[in-house]
């Protein structure tokens, strides 16, 4: 099921904004929203006409998007929308996330008195984003989904930051591009949101109860469920 059934309007990037960043976000939204099928050409000239900008910010944005894996560039063929991650790639990605993030969660356990209030705040923001999606009628706006994805990722970043290990944090951050690619498989933002929210709440509860083993178990279970939902197209 496509995330966005309605036609996506094109908006002009603001003159005062950084054009490359604005164009980057717009193309990223289209890719995550399923507007482009795997293999669809992303022609610089065509995109420049659509966004009414010069070719330079388009080219720069596509170079950055190529780093995420969402866009591919082939000799004499230009840029194209990449295929979603395979099941094996998603399994490998989640395996690495579990290794890194549970290590961070154990280290963050040492400063849980500072961590828990920030996790609660992140959970509240995620709840607001999920509620906003649930209250929406019809297909979701791209901006709504982006807000939800950011709130979801922020929860994990709080734990990484409190791990006190910048290498753990940077290693997981480097995977965020591939997490974007996993999100291409989600059939709807609403079905995943409440599930992820409940799973995050279990992680917070384990920290509150000062049970390190339960923290690791809840986080591992959450990431495993993320994989299951992605593989099933939810």
Image (tube, helix red, strand yellow):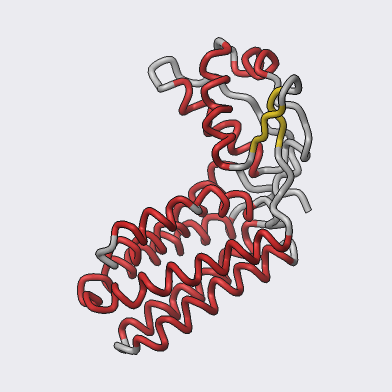
Pick whichever, 27 or 62, lies toward us.
62
The furthest residue to the front: 75
Give the residue displayed 33% in from the left and 81% down from the top: 207
Check the image and report above or below for 59 versus 29.
above
The residue at the point 60 percent across, 68 percent down is 226
Quadrant (top left/top right/bottom left/bottom right) for the N terminus? bottom right
Q: Nearer the viewer, residue 7 or 187?
A: 187
On the image, the x and y values in percent for residue 153 come to 45, 57
Image coordinates of residue 223 in percent, x first then y, are 55, 71
Q: Nearer the viewer, residue 203 or 103?
A: 103
Q: Which quadrant is the C terminus positioned in?
A: bottom right
**Residue at x 46%, y 20% (from the top left corner):** 19
| Residue occupying image coordinates x 28% and y 63% | 165
Quarter of the view holding residue 210: bottom left
How far across and how far down the image is residue 25, in percent? 52, 34
Task: Give the quarter of the image for residue 82.
Answer: top right
């Amino acid at each position: 099921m496509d995330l966005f059934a309605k036609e996506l309007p094109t908006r002009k990037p603001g003159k005062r904004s950084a054009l490359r960043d604005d164009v980057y976000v717009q193309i990223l939204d289209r890719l995550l929203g399923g507007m482009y099928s795997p293999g669809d050409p992303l022609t610089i000239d065509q995109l420049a006409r659509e966004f009414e900008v010069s070719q330079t910010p388009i080219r720069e944005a596509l170079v950055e998007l190529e780093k995420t894996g969402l866009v591919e560039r082939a000799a004499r063929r230009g840029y194209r929308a990449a295929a979603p991650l395979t099941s094996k790639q998603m399994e490998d990605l989640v395996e690495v996330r579990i290794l890194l993030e549970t290590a961070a969660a154990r280290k963050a356990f040492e400063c849980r008195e500072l961590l828990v209030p920030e996790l609660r705040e992140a959970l509240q923001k995620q709840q607001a984003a999920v509620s906003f999606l649930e209250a929406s009628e019809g297909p979701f706006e791209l901006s709504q989904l982006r807000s939800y994805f950011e709130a979801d990722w922020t929860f994990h970043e709080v734990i990484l930051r409190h791990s006190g290990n910048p290498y753990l944090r940077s290693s997981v951050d480097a995977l965020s591009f591939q997490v974007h690619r996993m999100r291409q498989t989600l059939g709807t933002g609403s079905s995943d949101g409440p599930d992820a929210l409940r799973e995050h709440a279990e992680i917070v509860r384990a920290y509150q109860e000062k049970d390190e083993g339960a923290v690791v178990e809840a986080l591992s279970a959450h990431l495993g469920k993320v994989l299951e939902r992605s593989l099933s197209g939810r």
